Amino acid sequence: MPSTALRGELREQESLAGYTSWRVGGPARRLYRPADLEDLAVFLSQLSPAEPLLWIGLGSNLLVGDEGFAGTVILTQGCLTAMRLDEPGRIHAQAGVSCAKLARFAARNDLVGVEFLAGIPGTLGGALAMNAGAWGGETWPHVRRLWTIDRGGVIRERDAADFSPGYRQVSGPSGEWFAAAELGLARGDGEAGMTRMRALLDERAQRQPIGLPSCGSVFRNPPGDHAARLIEALGLKGCRIGGAQVSEKHANFIINTGDATASDISALIDHVRDAVELGTGIRLIPEVRRVAGERL
């Protein structure tokens, strides 16, 4: 009989500021870091069906309110990181593997096509959930099979055709979260792939405010245009609310200058979106997921 004893780490009233790339966010009622996928399945099977759940990988593209989260956070950061080469051209990776690590693993095995992932500041789980992309590449064209887990702890194997990816969004079976994926990649020159990654990361460092707390790109690019161009054209670079500021380096980044609250950042997102709509007629759609909950 499978063990029902938990092997992961459970914390209560845990501040989420240390788990999000903006470095803001109030406490979670509970935070669980599973030992592995099997342990996560046991933990989920023991939760109340009514318990609110929030999944956090590296915490990018996520804004948790100052009031915190009145539920349970599942943390995949530092766990669910198993990765292997299954067969020629196929990589099996769990949801907690960082995008950068996956890109390097592919290149070391002379597989190409996912070099763009080196510049995505998140995990594979997040990349799957939002069809993350950069420099002309996207995640889902490489997905072949997936493994999901539901809140009852049931793990399912699914075909990529069970999901419908779009621009920075993916729809599929409800009530399931990505646990792992198999990616199909072309054989190629791994050293050339590493060189391309280094070039992309150099370009990223020159154009984006690397090293400052941000979530990555705040808004999706509208069809035929770039959110950063629209924001900059309206003179919004450097605009501040409290400790939150539109980056002087890249207008589609909002940075925490050191003392920002989640409320500051949220207000600045709304201000930029409204200003762009008023000035251009284009309503920008945030990539950021905003999570608010009752004050604990």
Image (cartoon, grey):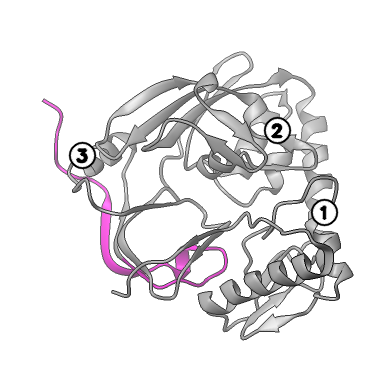
Dot 3 or dot 1, earlier in sequence: 3
Could you tell whether 149 is left or right of 1 in the image? right
Task: Residue lying at the far top in this picture: please name it.
Answer: 88
Q: Which residue is mark 1?
A: 226
Residue 212 appears in the figure: no
Could you tell whether 277 is left or right of 33 in the image? right
Q: Which residue is mark 3?
A: 45
Query: Residue 134, how many percent across, how many down?
Result: 74, 44
Identify the residue at horizontal 31%, vertical 46% (top origin): 34
Viewer-side residue, 184 vs 296: 296
Q: Which residues are magenta?
A: 1-28
Query: Residue 122, how many percent across, how many down?
Result: 58, 49
How crowded pointer 3 is (Cα within 10 Å; few <14, some 14-19, many 20+) is rated as: some
Dot 3 or dot 2, earlier in sequence: 3
Residue 75 appears in the figure: yes
Query: Residue 117, how many percent across, how many down?
Result: 68, 41
Identify the residue at horizontal 15%, vertical 28% (top origin): 2
Up/down of 203 relative to 181, above or below:
below
Q: Secondary structure at mark 1?
A: loop
Q: CA distance from mark 2 to mark 1?
A: 22 Å
Dot 2 or dot 1, earlier in sequence: 2
Q: Secondary structure at mark 2?
A: loop
Up/down of 222 relative to 296, above or below:
above
Q: Amino acid at mark 1?
A: His
Query: Residue 92, how many percent across, how many down?
Result: 51, 25
